[in-house]
Image: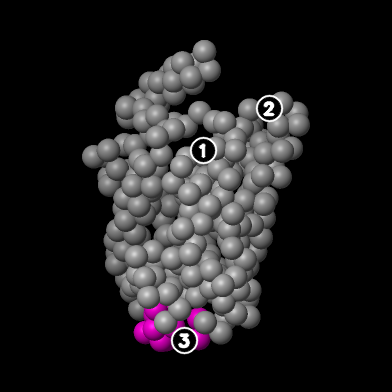
Amino acid sequence: MQVYRDMDIGTAKPSLAMRRRVPHHLLDLVEPEEDFPVALFQQHGLAALAEIDAVDATTVICGGSGLHFRSLVDPLDFPPSDDSVRAELEALDAEEARRRLEALDATAVAHVDMANPRRVVRALEVAVLTGLTPSRRAASDNAGAIRDYRPRREFVGIGLDPGDSLEQRVKERFDAMLRAGLLDEVAGLRDRLGRLARQAVGYKELLPVVAGVATIEEGRDAAVGASMALAKRQRTFFRRDPRIEWITWDPDLSTRIRRVEEHIEKVLA
C-alpha cells in the first residue's frame, strides 16, 4: 500500500529523513484512485532490483505481503486484468458470481475462497480473459513454482515475530497512528480511494468513522482486529517458506540487530 501517494500515516511510510539516509524504492508510485495489482508491483520491483544490482549495492526487501515478496524473488507469473471485464463482473451480486464460477469449474471451491466476493470475481475475470479456470491454474507450472520455493534470485530470508506481544504492539502502533493524524488522513482521502486502496487495513475500518456511522472507538477496535487477522495470514504464508530463518524476538533493538547480523554472516560464510 506504500505505492499510493498521500497514504502515509496508515501505511507507516518511511519518513523523508529515513529516505535520505537509505534509498527506498516503490514508494509513491501512483494515486490512490488507481489500482496497483501485484503484477505491476512485480514489474516495477524487478526494474528497481536491476538498477540496484547494476551498481552492486545491497538490497533489503521488507514488508508484510508474502505474495509481493515472492513476486520479486520467485519465478511467478500473474494473469492479465481488464478494467471493463472486471467492472461487468463486479456488477453481479455475490451469489450470481459464485454460480457463474461454479458453472465454469465445478471444483473451483477447492482453489478459491468462495466466501470472498473479490476473489470470486478475480477468478472469473482470469477465466474470461485466458480460459484458465481455477482448477487448471492450480495444475499449471506457475502453481508449481508457488509450491516449490525455487528462487530466481538468491536471498537471505529472515523473519521476526514478536509472538505473544504482537497484539499489544499492534494496539500501540495503531494508537500512535491515530495520534499522528490518521483519521484526518483518511477523511482527506475518502473520495480518492480506489478499489484496492480502499481495502487497506486501517483505512477501511476508519471510513465508517469519517462517514459518521461508527465511533472512533469502534473504528479503532475494528482496525486492531483486522491487523491481527492480517498478521495471522502473514504468519501462515511466511512460515511455509523453508528459506526463511526465524530469529528469536527480543524487546531490545540492538539485540535483534545483532541476531540478524549473526545469521547473515553465517549464511554468507
Asked whether residue 224 appears in the rendered view, the answer is no
Residue in front for this viewpoint, 154 or 129 = 129
Q: Which circle marks residue 211 in the picture?
A: none
Looking at the image, tell me whether mark 1 or mark 2 is earlier in sequence order.
2
Residue 217 percent across, percent down from the top left = 29, 64
- Vertically, is 36 above or below 121? above
Magenta stretch bounds: 90-102
Residue that appears at 76% across and 31% down = 54
Residue 189 part of the magenta segment: no
How would you classify the magenta stretch by its main secondary structure? Answer: helix
Q: Which residue is mark 3?
A: 92
* Dot 2 amino acid type: Ala
C-alpha separation, residue under disc 3 versus residue under disc 1: 39 Å
Q: Which residue in the protein does label 2 denote? A: 57
Please name the residue shown 30% across and 58% down the image: 225
Q: Disc 2 versus disc 3: distance between alpha carbons?
A: 48 Å
The tag earlier along the polypeptide, 3 or 1, is: 3
Residues at marks 1 and 2, CA–CA distance in whole angstroms: 23 Å
Counting from the top left corner in percent of width and height, residue 39 is at: 61, 57
What is the three-letter code of the residue carrying label 1?
A: Arg
Q: Which residue is mark 1?
A: 150
Left/right of residue 196 with respect to residue 135 in the rendered view: right
Q: x%, y% of residue 134?
A: 45, 67
